[in-house]
Amino acid sequence: MRLERAIERLIAACQRLLAIVRRRRLDRDLDEEIAFHLSMREAEHRASGASADDARYAARRRFGNVTHLKERTRDMWTFPSFESVRQDVRYALRTLRRSPAFTGVAIVVLALGIAGNTAMFSLVDAVRLRALPYAESDRLVILWGNVMRAKVERRGASYPDFLDWRAQATSFEGMAAGDETRMTLLGANEASRILVETVSAAYFPLLRVNAAVGRTFTADEDVVPQKIAVVVLSDAFWRRQLGGDPQIVGRPLVLDARPYTVVGIMPPGFRGIGDRADAWIPFVMSNTAEGLAQRGSRGFQVVARLKPGVSRAQAQAELDAISRRLERAYPDTNEKRGVEVSALDQEVFGDIRPALRALMIAVAFVLLIACANVANLLLARSEARQREIAVRTAIGAGWPRLLRQLVTESCVLTGIAAILGLGLAAAGLRVLLRASPVTFPSFVQPHVDLRVAAFTAVVSVACGILLGLAPAMHGRVARLADALKESARGSDGARARKVRSALVVAEVSLAVLLLIGAGLMIRTVQHLVAIDPGFNPDRVLTARVSIPRQAAIAASDTPAPFVVAARTLLDRVRALPGVAAASLASDPPLSGLESAIFYSAEGQGATNAQTMPRAYFHRVTPDFFSTLGISLRNGRTFLESELRPDSRVVIVSEHVVTRFWPEQDPVGKRIKFGQLASHRSSIGRRCRWSCARTWTPRRSRRRFARRFATWIRPFRCSRSPR
């Protein structure tokens, strides 16, 4: 019985929905049926001797109210509430058409506010609400090595530490190590630089990503040494550089003068965790066995996948225990060293999310200001409609009916604005992504889809209800006579003035908050621009030069070839037209890529581990300071004869002098780097050099050493506009 009733109700609901679509046809059928019944009754009366007029009148009296019968029949056909809303919408459209100026201004103001919120929500949706493009990405974490377990700095891991973590930790399904490097691709006619990720074999299974063509790395390709070098290509690189040749798998590709066999091509869109890799090679193929065995050499990134049901806190506790065991086993390299477990999505989106939150709040304020503005317009417009509202109340319209009509009018207004706002948001997103100083990952593609459209619909309905309440509350008068009299006089009314004044105050308050926030942001930008970097960046150009790893290794016992190559490079750059000076350095200024090492000053005694300073140093040639216009306060710059591995000279920053030798001449003082047995003599003090990484103010400069030959950067200072 219940099933039969449910089926009957479902059929009735479907018939009502179908009647909405077939409304005109049903109305024609109803008119024809009513006309048929009237003609039959009229014929009966005429047959009994009545005149045509009398027969027509008697037939209509007997049949009843035709209009009422039509309304009752339509109510049985469709949903009465839907019909009532449809009438309200039609009336609202007619009302808005009669005031084109008001309608146009209100729609434009609301559309701008809704467009801003829609655009920002699409960004938030892409960055915060959608997961990373990896299966069960919420279980992916990054393992950072940190100093003294204070979580004050992050560094990579050494390969032996990674092997110990992987062997001893039980909280993870898998763990992989990786690094980034740039390699020279040797083509048929030219060479190009590509970004390569060096990863362990577990990297791709860990991310649950399979090769689209061929395969990824096997476990035996994680073994040192490896005779056959293999490489996996990204889909973008494969199409851009190799023309999408499907026969490339199995063929050699020359990277850094070494042939690599292509074994696979990854699916479109995948470019690794860093989202910029062109290719991947096995981790052990880019590092020597001796280098991988150094526990104190840290810099490798470690990614892991938590087991189901294991939290980051549990994994952190286990890794802390492992760190303590490694500290006891290897005190020379692992003293006070710990591990930090960080969610992968936080690492990918961490810098973007705070900015998006601030912008979302800002555009929400803009929408509130727009709503207050339009509400003020609606209040002013409602004054002209007081007589209409009073008359409708007098003939029987209740307060709920009037409220629904006014809210419907405002919802129609916001609905039109929402449609326009969606178009503006779609166009604005493209402009925002091009002009944004923030680099979004390639898999973050904010666009207007069903989720964003649903958000816009909710925002427009909420705004419509809020906007409709203001004139509705104002129009709810207690005495019709007073309302009619007030309307006739054209008086604003004390209550209307109070409401409008409150809305103006709200608008001004929100605008002031926005202006204060914008002013603070402008002031921050001005301060950042006004910071003196300590050198003259005008007309300074940089270029990156790489020497193949094999060439550097071959020259490791004979530094002369590299020194000759470096000097030849500098001579050629200096000979270029418009070049005033040139030098070599391991990293550009303010790049955040400086190498770091612990240091101490001679005679200062043991430094407390919790306050041990770290030196962020650059390896430079003697002309580095003059090229960038950096003056030395004391001492001298490097000599050409000091470009030797056994040189023990250093130029220190103002911070080092202030820490160890305040009010003293630092020239001739000695400092010790890391575990080195010997000290280095200071030969000069340079002026302060501001750095983007302001959390480590201590800086020092060291000589350019040949063992870093695989990544050097020439600095050119051009005095011509070109």
Image (cartoon, rainbow, N blue to C red):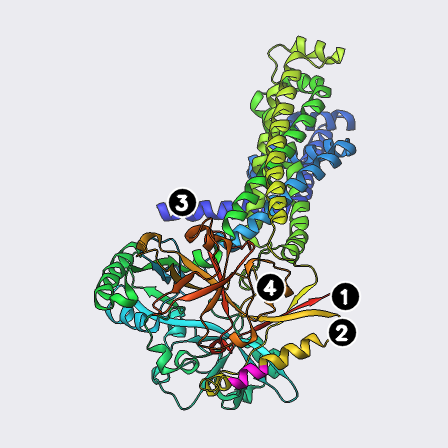
Q: Secondary structure at mark 1?
A: loop
Of badges 4 and 3, the one in the foreground is 4
389 with respect to 549 (left or right): right
Give the number of the disc on residue 625. 4
Residue 471 seen anywhere in this rendered image of the structure: no
Q: Quadrant of residue 380?
A: top right
Place residue 511 in its image quadrant.
Answer: top right
Q: Is residue 253 above or below residue 443?
A: below
SS majority, magenta: helix
Dot 2 or dot 4, earlier in sequence? 2
How far is mark 1 from mark 4, CA to CA?
20 Å
Is 146 rendered above or below residue 583?
Answer: above
Given the image, on which type of amino acid does mark 3 rest? Arg
Which residue position holds label 2?
577
Q: CA distance from mark 2 to mark 4?
A: 21 Å
Question: For the magenta stretch, what is the residue range?
Answer: 560-565
Rendering coords of residue 558 (x, y %):
48, 87
Q: Is disc 2 in contact with disc 4, using a CB cutoff of under 8 Å? A: no
Q: Is residue 472 above or below residue 191?
A: above
| Numbered disc 3: secondary structure | helix
Mark 2 touches mark 1? (CB < 8 Å): yes
Q: Which residue is mark 1?
A: 720
**Residue receiving disc 3:** 5
